[in-house]
Image (tube, grey):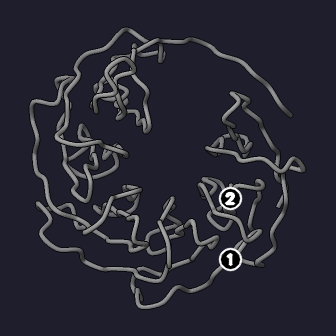
Amino acid sequence: VSTQSTWEQKNTGYCIFSLCNLPIPQLLIGVGIESASRSPALLSVSVDKDGGFLGPKDVRAPPAQSLKVESLRSLPNLNTCVATSVNGCISVFDVAKGDFSNMKTTWSAHTDFLTCLRASQFSPQLISGSQEGDIHLWDMRSPPTAPTAALTYHTRMVTDLAKAGEHGLFSSSVDSSVLQWDVRQSSVPVAMFVPDMKSVLCIKTSPLNSEWLAISTLAGLYCLDTNSSQLHALSTEKSAHTGVDWNSVNGLLYSCKLNGEVEAYQHFG
């Protein structure tokens, strides 16, 4: 099923690389660049209770380009906070007032560019991946100083991270692999999957079945049953799907492409 529909648009004047939603205090937080000046920016946009756009709340210029932003709403005592990346550093802002005036902490997380961030829904943990291919786990119960674990198996840039239960983690990379981890035993991955020998762009575990993993590569879209290791090709068109997400109610898998198309797939496991 393919569809192109837009409920509402808001021209912010910024090219946004990464976006997250905080239901409280009803904000969208983005990182990107100002379209005209190309200057790096952190941007907050307020939304109403039904999700409609009300307008920009605050813009801040970080010291360098920020590539990722992640909502920390699932973490205790950080439910109005976001984490952003600047080079190899992570900064946490409390945006309860709609702006970036309250920076709670910042720390050096990687020696190279930070390429992905993911907050755990199961523990007070933030996970980061880097251009070098390493993955760090951070305990967010206090300001981090050192990772609680370091996963170093990917040979190239980490592109995405997806939690699967309290101890499970999937990671994807430009090295064409998807790795499955048990974070209690972080020396080597539990399993490795290579969908099609192309760079993996993004991954997402199904909220209805944590053994289903949506995988997008430069050449296709797949659903992996990690229990049986069966890989199902969902798209017959060899093109890159730049984002994927599951509908937690009906199990549909949504994907988006650079040309603006949004597609929906029904997977039967």
| Type of amino acid at the residue the image marks with label 2 | Ile
Determine which quarter of the picture holds residue 100. top left
Q: Residue furthest front?
A: 37
Looking at the figure, which quarter contains the N terminus?
A: top right
Q: Which mark is residue 215?
A: 2
Residue at disc 1, secondary structure: strand
Q: Where is 219 relative to 138, above or below?
A: above
Residue at disc 2, secondary structure: strand
Q: Where is 185 relative to 79, above or below?
A: below
* Residue at the image point whose x is 43% and y is 72% from the top: 133
Q: Position of residue 266 (x, y in %)?
A: 82, 45
The one of 75 and 105 positioned closer to us in this rendering: 105
N-terminal of the pair, mark 2 or mark 1, is: 1
Looking at the figure, which quarter contains the C terminus?
A: bottom right
Q: Which mark is residue 193?
A: 1
* Residue at the image point whose x is 40% and y is 13% from the top: 48
Q: Are marks 2 and 1 in contact (CB under 8 Å)?
A: yes
Q: Where is 241 relative to 127, above or below?
A: above
Determine which quarter of the picture holds residue 248. top right
Q: Position of residue 140 (x, y in %)?
A: 21, 61
Count of numbered circles on the image: 2
Q: Residues within 10 Å of mark 1 (few under 14, many from 20)?
A: some
* Residue at the image point whose x is 41% and y is 36% from the top: 20
| Type of amino acid at the residue the image marks with label 1 | Phe
Q: Position of residue 121 (x, y in %)?
A: 41, 56
The one of 160 and 38 positioned closer to us in this rendering: 38
Q: Tell me the CA gap for discs 2 and 1.
A: 10 Å
* Residue at the image point whose x is 31% and y is 21% from the top: 37
Q: Position of residue 191 (x, y in %)?
A: 61, 84
